[in-house]
Image: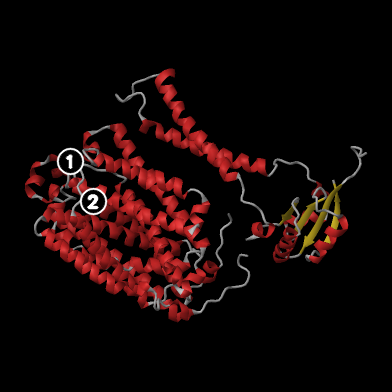
Amino acid sequence: MGAHGVQKIDEKEFDIGSHWIGKLPLVGLVLGILGLGASIALGLGDKEQFFFSYHVSYMYFLSIALGAFFFVIVQFAAKAGWSVLLRRIAENLAGILPFFILLGIPLVLGSHTLFHHWADETVRETDPFIVHKAPYLNEPFFYIRMAFYFVVWAVLSSIFRKKSVSQDTSGDRKTTRFLQNLSYPSIFLFALTITFASVDWIMSMDPHWYSTMFGVYYFSGSLVAIYASLIIVAMALQSHTGFGKVFNVEHFHDVGKLMFAQTAFWAYIAFSQFFLIWYANIPEETLFFKHRIEGSWMGVSVALAIGHFVIPFIFLLPSQMKRNKAVLLVGAVWMLLVHFLDIYWLIMPVHQHHGMHITVLDVTTFVGLGGLFLAIFGWYMKQAKIVPTKDPRLAESLAFENIV
Amino acid sequence: MSQPDEKKAFGLLAEFETPKALYLACEKVRDAGYKKWDAHSPFPVHGLDKAMGLKPSVLPWIVAVMAVIGGVGGFFLQVWINVSAYPQVISAKPYVSWPAFVPVTFELTVLLSAFGAVFGMFGLNKLPQLYHSLFESDRFARVTDDKFFISIEADDPQFGTQATKELLSQAGAVHIEEVQS
């Protein structure tokens, strides 16, 4: 029964301790070095494919970290109580954002491959479309914007994580108020940076085409990814003595609801983008979809619509599906996989015009970046308590219950 | 035997001071095996559905059926209009262009789901109901303010005025009264 009697927790139980997530730094680092080493070795033979494969994995893991950052700032802005148990996991995932500056080096090195449609000077001077877009799409301004996104993400995500961790020892309630006040401008900056970053790094690969919905499209995918990730991490932590006791089916149900809502939101955005382009039928807009219905890309497009919306919508609709841990885990893993297909579908057709062919580089860059991503995440999880133990709204999260 | 104007017992109405007392009493009434009874509270009490032993509502199924009717109906309404009722070539597209039908299909799915949810809820709650026997009780007016009640109907096969009264007072009722229908 709801909020009758405040549940007390033993703070000592909320270290990662001997749980296997504590071993991720080592395992992830090995995977990361092996994966990236193999990618570089293979990439020497096919530079273009290396840069594109790396870009897919980079945008994929970046979307999870950005989604996590959005989750954290929204919880503060909304003064959310139910999610306090999950917030440290999201803070740690968002804390990986500064490392994306280093991981972004191949983006800079490969800029003439990835963005050759506008980064190449001869094209820029002869193509009438690009000539008019040159005040925005030129290299100096591109790197200035890139630096701006990175600074915003790195600084804000670090502040949120560090301040929240410091509250574990100080128990200072002012920290919560401070982060709440910081969350409002953060939401504004987040919306601005994720929109322009996705336009710069994905949409500008095909600079003849444009869509005013593109930023929201990438954002909607990143939200699916973060809720799926939170479910998977929370599920992994069910075997943790402290976390397993307090994080129950009620919390899973709520994250499941959010993940379900985001698949519908993604479909809404994806269809709205497609629908207007299809109806107007203007060549400079249809180009994007023309590339994606050619050859085997048609099959991928259909698979994406069914796999990213139809199947999860029906699968996750009944409340019992979100209240069954095993079923919800299957749904979350599925969503993370189709989210990868989504990013792959956004980027790879620029390189492979007439059909999809999966390369070893797709796998090795994914394993490499994923390994490093998990290594940093695991390292963060070892640095602090795995839930914000002195958050003033923790009791609310412990007592959280759905009315079904 | 019974004549239309003869007063008949509706059942018993028990009053409780706190949501906790109501919750614990509900568990007792549920365990005693009563079927035709209800709990009344000024605000939602977390977990009361479990304490009362309520089964999940069938409302989601009503909504699901209405959604399917709305979606399928909305889609084929447009197919019928564009193919046989009033065929028009728009933007040089085929008569049946499914993407063009999605907004109306979506809206009708949502509309009929909402109808199903609202009117289904009315139906399941037997609303609108202008009169209820419990309105006869003066004390019951405070259910919208600060008191909590359990009513057990005389139609319940388990019901026996004396036995049920005993159960309710053991469950912590501060006041029990018989309500006429």
* Chain of the residue on which disc 2 is drawn: A
Q: Nearer the viewer, residue B15 or A313?
A: A313
> Which part of the image, by quadrant, shows the C terminus of chain B?
top right
Q: How is the image coloured?
A: secondary structure
Measured from the top left, where is residue A345 in percent x and y?
26, 47
Measured from the top left, where is residue A78 in percent x and y?
47, 61
> Dot 1, crowdedness within 10 Å: few (<14), some or many (≥20)?
some
* Residue picked out by circle 1: A354
- Name the residue at 51% across, 65% down: A248
Q: Is residue A123 left or right of residue B15?
A: left
Tell me the amino acid under the disc marked 2. Answer: Ile
Q: Secondary structure at mark 2?
A: loop
Q: Is residue A206 visible?
A: no
Q: Is residue A349 above or below residue A42?
A: above
Task: Choose top left, top right, bottom left or bottom right for residue A330.
Answer: bottom left
Q: Is residue A232 left or right of residue A107?
A: right
Q: Is residue B154 above or below residue B16?
A: above
Q: Which mark is residue A113?
A: none
Of badges 2 and 1, nearer the viewer stands 1
Q: Which mark is residue A202?
A: 2
Tell me the amino acid under the disc marked 1. Answer: His
* Chain of the residue on which disc 1 is drawn: A
Q: Is residue A97 above or below residue A201?
A: below
> Dot 2, crowdedness within 10 Å: few (<14), some or many (≥20)?
many
Q: Secondary structure at mark 1?
A: loop
Task: Choose top left, top right, bottom left or bottom right for residue B132.
Answer: top right
